[in-house]
Amino acid sequence: MIIERRFHGPDESGNGGYVAGLLAKRVPTDTVTVTLRLPPPLETELTVTVEDERGHSLRLWDGERLIAEGLAGAIVVPPVPGVPFEEAVAAAEKYRAAENNPFPGCFVCGPDREPGDGLRLEPGPVAEDTVAAPWAPEEVPGRELVWAALDCPGAWSFDVAARPAVLGTMTAQVSDVPEAGERCVVMGATRSREGRKTHTATALYGADGRLLGRAEQIWIEIDPERFRS
């Protein structure tokens, strides 16, 4: 597995949701938990090992360094409710990252990315500890891109600009992918906080309100200087 530089979050490591989605695609279950152990390196040949006979447990390695683990998972709590597309568009106008995104080049939420290069999601507040972002993919996305879209809105639900953090664990279920140009809404909400950890949830809804994907996450507060080139 190689993580192309285009799909970075911090400047020198892969976007957590995207990398998790690449690994999750290899687990033959509809819900997968991925734990990121180290920043995923870019443009590097990584090795995936299968840890059980059914393929329900995988590990991602950079040489002898364990980068991530993927396991068959489960989600038992209700998803974050959606909002209308128009409300998500209005929320995006209040996106707080224009000047203070800790990772402005992030593939998912980076304001420095050119249209068509990154997803350029702009999660803005719609309620306390809850954000929404519109998303209309130009092409039918792979499931790893749905995992990516389900990533950063969780962080912006607790204002990651004020409390820089990276994804630690993500359990996601992707039931379908949007059509090209479909007007989708990505939701993010904070569940709870515990020390340096923040528990969040995200959900992706299609134009007809169908639930395309959902995730539960754990974010870990960090010093962003450690992740900058």
Image (tube, grey):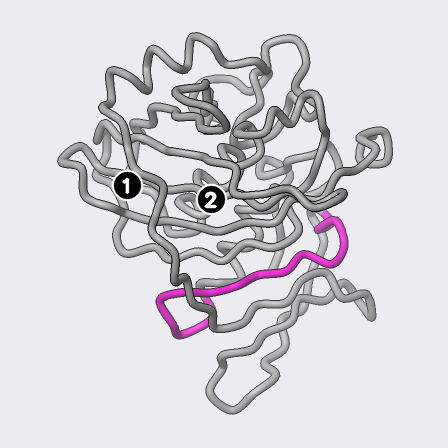
Structural crowding at the residue carrying mark 1, measured as other residues with C-alpha within 10 Å and reported as few (<14), some (14–19) or many (≥20): some
Q: Is residue 36 magenta?
A: yes
- Locate residue 116, reporting x and y percent: 42, 24
Q: Is residue 94 magenta?
A: no
Residue located 80% across and 30% down the image:
224
Q: Is residue 20 above or below residue 102?
A: below
Q: Which residue lies under the disc numbered 1?
A: 140
**Left or right: 68 with respect to 57?**
right
Query: Magenta stretch: dominant SS?
Result: loop
- Locate residue 193, reporting x and y percent: 64, 42
Quadrant for the C terminus in the image:
top right
- Locate residue 126, reporting x and y percent: 39, 20
Which of 190 and 66 lies nearest the eye of the viewer? 190
Residue located 32% across and 15% down the image:
89
Extent of the magenta region: 26-41
Residue type at mark 2 is: Ala
Residue 164 figure quarter: top right
Secondary structure under the numbered disc 1 in the rendered image: loop
Q: Which residue lies under the disc numbered 2?
A: 201
